[in-house]
Each structure stands twice: as structure tokens, then as C-alpha cells.
Image: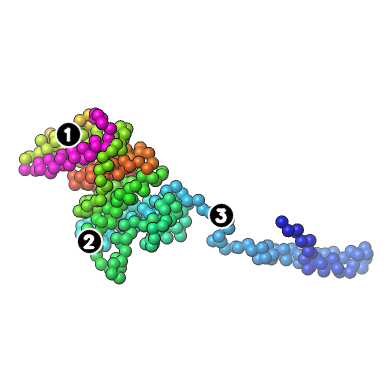
Amino acid sequence: MSARPAPQLQPGVRAAAAAPAHPGSPAGMPSRRVLLRGAIAGAVAVGVTAASGCGIQLEQDAPIPFITRRPMPDEGALLTAYRDVSQLAAEAARTAGPHGAAISARHTRQRAVLEQVLRDGGVPDDVLARALATPTSSTAPTGSTGVAPSPAASSSASVGGATPEATAGRPEDLATAELALVAPERLRRLADSGPARGLLIALSVHAGATGLGLGGAPAWPADAGGLLLDEVAARPVLTAMAGLAYVTELAAARTPAGSRAPLVELVARVRARERRIRAIAGQGLVVPPYGFGSPAAITDAGAGHSAVRAALVDVVDVALRSIAALAPGSTALEPLVRTAVEALVDATAYGHPMPTFPGMTD
């Protein structure tokens, strides 16, 4: 470190020191008036130097040097979801058909919740604003403060020079954008997420069920064929699905023959889903066949309809609880998300309102 320069007197103080002594004062001593004037001049000079010469910025938003903000956990994934639901809300609002407004309202609610979560985590406004911009590259990892691009964003981009706001959207285009949130690569990234995984999975299940309900075809990953689910995760899901199949069969038996076909078809779908889960669970896993308790006795078609709806919602909740118990990076997340999405689509067909955050309190 360089030697500190010798302290210099301020001009007023030097003048005071050099002034002749006042008559009557001891030899070599300046008068009190000169000393006071020099002290005031020196204090003013020091104040000016502190306010300007030392580089202190008085602006309220002045940057603080050498301080780097620490990202909140899962910030990149949350920012990606924030951008996605914002774009989906806009796309749904301009989509023709009877469902666009309701879908847009749910995505708007999701955006508000995500924004609050991000603000509570200390994410500043400029980062939120950048997240809403359409990304131009895929270099940002989801674990950083950057926002990874997604198919949902590209589906909202302008095509052929026409901006999305200029034309009404088609339901099939909205379905494609929704289903981008359950694409295999997206779910694989979510499997590695941290404390925000429950919220992010709820958003994906909502989007998957919305896209499937609009007639879209999800690109589910191929069946793994290997052991993915341990007994702790598999047993509750298989128990809930067995109970759903039983309740649906009982409801079909209480329904007139002319109205029974949808229930019979539902039983077939549930049994196929059950076999899919068994294929990735441990061999020899035995579950009770009547794992769901109906909220009321199934004595007629109406009671059967209500029981089936409740059993479907139970499958959704159980699948999401099993997802929450998975280890980070588990490949079992994808088939469990598919189970929750398909059960939620069937539940809404039986009158259950589409939740904004499946498995969570809206």
C-alpha cells in the first residue's frame, strides 16, 4: 500500500494560521475572529468534499458495488414458469371457443402467485421484466437466474410477420402450447428441482390436463420397462387406482344400460393405467382392490356419478403426493405426472372444476 500523503490544511485554515496576531494577543497567535472564520471555511470544504469529491452517490437507486445478489432456490425454473403462464394467459384470452376466458383466468391467477413467490424470494423487478421477454437462445440453465426457452414461448411468437395479438387463436394451438409444459425434457428438468417442485409440478399437471382437454395429444415418454417406483411410491397410487376401478364398475352397475358406455370405457382406461404403473413397480406388490371409500352409498346413477368423480380426484391427489416423496432426479416423476394428468381430465369430465393448482389449495 502506498504511503499516505501528509495531511494538508484547508485553505481557510492555512489563511488563519498565516494571519498576523491580533493586537493584544500573544505573539504569533491569530485572533479569535480569524480562527473562527478559518474553522467555518474548513468545515464547509470538508462537507463539499464528502458529498462530491469522494464519489458518494445520493441517488436512491444507485448501484452498490461489489455486492452480487444470491438467486433464490429454483429461481430459473420459477422464472420460466412465470413467463410460460403469462404467455399462456395471453394466448388463451384470444383463443376462439367457450373455454379460452376461463383458461386465461386460471393462468392469470398462476402468474400472480408466481410473481409473489419470486418477489418474496428477493427477485427484483428488472429480472421479472426480462423473464417475460421471448428468449432468443437456449444457453441459460434453469438453475441460474436466466430463463430457459420453452416450446410454450415459441408457440406464442409471431409467425410470418403477424403478431399474436392481431388474430384470434385456435384451440388446437393453445393445446399445443399447454402440452409443452409436460414435454419429456421439461419434466426431466422438473425432476431435478428443489423446494419449488410441488408448485412447478402443479402448474405442469394443470397445463397437461388443459391441453389434453382441448384435444391435444401429449408426447408422453415411452414406457421405461424397468423398475422406477419403489413400494412407498407405488402402493398408494395402485391402491387409489384399484379403488377407482371398483367404484366405476359399481357405478356402471347402477346406471341404466343406455347411459353405461362412458363408465365402461373409463374402467378400461383405468385398468390400462394401472397396468402401466405395475410395469414399473416392484414385482409381487399386492394392493387392496377396494382402496377408495365412497363418500356415499352407490344406490343409483347419480350417486355413482358423484363417487366416480371423487375417486378420480383421489387418484390425482395420491399421485401428486407420491411425486412429492420422490428423490431429486427420479425418473418416476414422468409416469406419475401422466397418471395425475389423465385422472384430472376424467375428473373434469365428471363435473370436477379444473383447479388452478392441482393438489394444492388454490
Tell me where residue 157 appears, x and y as whole percent: 32, 64
Residue range in magenta is: 258-287
The one of 199 and 323 positioned closer to us in this rendering: 323
Q: How far apart are labels 1 and 2 at the CA level?
A: 38 Å
Q: Residue at x 53, y 54 (%)?
A: 68
Query: Could you tell me the amino acid type at mark 3?
Result: Ile
Residue 170's disc is 2
Quadrant of image for the N terminus: bottom right
**Circle 1 is placed at which residue position?**
246
The answer, for residue 222, to whether it is visible in the render is yes
Q: Is residue 308 magenta?
A: no
Circle 3 SS class: loop
Tell me where residue 8 appears, x and y as whole percent: 78, 64
**Circle 3 is placed at which residue position?**
67
Circle 1 SS class: helix
Task: Judge whether 264 appears above or below 11 on screen.
Answer: above
Q: Report the side of 293 relative to 150 (left or right).
A: left
Name which of mark 1 and mark 2 comes first in the sequence.
Answer: 2
The one of 209 and 110 positioned closer to us in this rendering: 209
Tell me where residue 259 appears, x and y as whole percent: 9, 43
Name which of mark 3 and mark 1 comes first in the sequence.
Answer: 3
Tell me where residue 341 appears, x and y as whole percent: 25, 46
Q: Report the side of 323 relative to 256 (left or right).
A: right
Q: Residue at x 35, y 38 (%)?
A: 326
Query: Could you tell me the amino acid type at mark 2?
Result: Arg
